Image (spheres, helix red, strand yellow):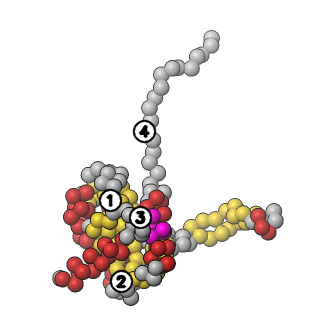
Amino acid sequence: MIKYPTTKKTYRKPRINQSNRGMGLEKLIDETNAYYIEHGKALIHKKPTPVQIVNVDYPRREMAKITEAYFRKPSTTDYNGVYKGLYIDFDVKETKHKTSYALKNIHDHQIRHLRGVKAHGGVAFILLKVETLNTVFLLPFERIETYLKRAEKGRKSMTIAEIEKEGYPIQESVSPRLDYLSAVDRYLKDMNKR
């Protein structure tokens, strides 16, 4: 008996890998930070991820290749630096959802870190790109914290409407590519009014 392959095709929904989401946005931020440094506006850099190198292959010195490494501990946030004498610390996130952003995407160690930055007088926030609106929002940490407290008793996400209301929108431009410091200025101005 010969078994022929079936022609029936099954469809599997592709798994979405959350780990590299935000990389396109990070490239924009890196370009913007280079512009800020070049023009003396701010000194903000991407934090390196703490990695422990275990094994290196040395066929020749100039061709050394890391063959085994692991993350020492979870990194805190993506960026930090100084702007107008203020310490700035933030993480970068993206969402493709049309209605909400799940708070579980902000990890506990990031929450603790941003809370500490805020407690010591620094400026702590998240830059969140909402793909459906093609807009990046600066979300101040103390506003995110309101939704984290709500999540303890109920809803585990922020709605897009809440993000639009609580966030400071940032549009892409030519130079700098993503002027998020203008949103920081608007946020600081609002804080001084309170």
Pair 4/3: label in front: 3
Which residue is found at the position 62% from the left and 11% from the top? Answer: 1
Q: Amino acid at mark 1?
A: Thr
Q: Residue 95: horizontal and vertical position, in percent?
A: 36, 55
Pair 4/2: label in front: 2
Which of disc 1 and disc 4 is earlier in sequence?
4
Q: Amino acid at mark 2?
A: Gly
Q: Secondary structure at mark 1?
A: strand
Q: Amino acid at mark 3?
A: Val
Q: Quadrant of residue 122?
A: bottom left
The residue pinned by badge 3 equals: 174
Which residue is found at the position 45% from the left and 76% from the top? Answer: 36
Q: CA distance from mark 3 to mark 1?
A: 15 Å
Please, is residue 119 above or below residue 32 in the view?
Answer: below
> Which segment is the magenta one?
28-33
Residue nearest the viewer, comparing 112 with 166 = 166
Residue nearest the viewer, comparing 193 with 176 = 176
Which of disc 2 and disc 1 is earlier in sequence?
2
The crowd level at tag 1 (other Cα within 10 Å; few <14, some 14-19, many 20+) is some
Q: CA distance from mark 4 to mark 3?
A: 37 Å
Q: Residue 164: horizontal and vertical position, in percent?
A: 24, 62
The residue pinned by badge 1 equals: 135
Judge from the rendering whether residue 165 lies leftward or rightward of residue 74; answer left or right.
Answer: left
Which residue is found at the position 81% from the left and 65% from the top? Answer: 60
Residue 122 numbered mark, or none: 2
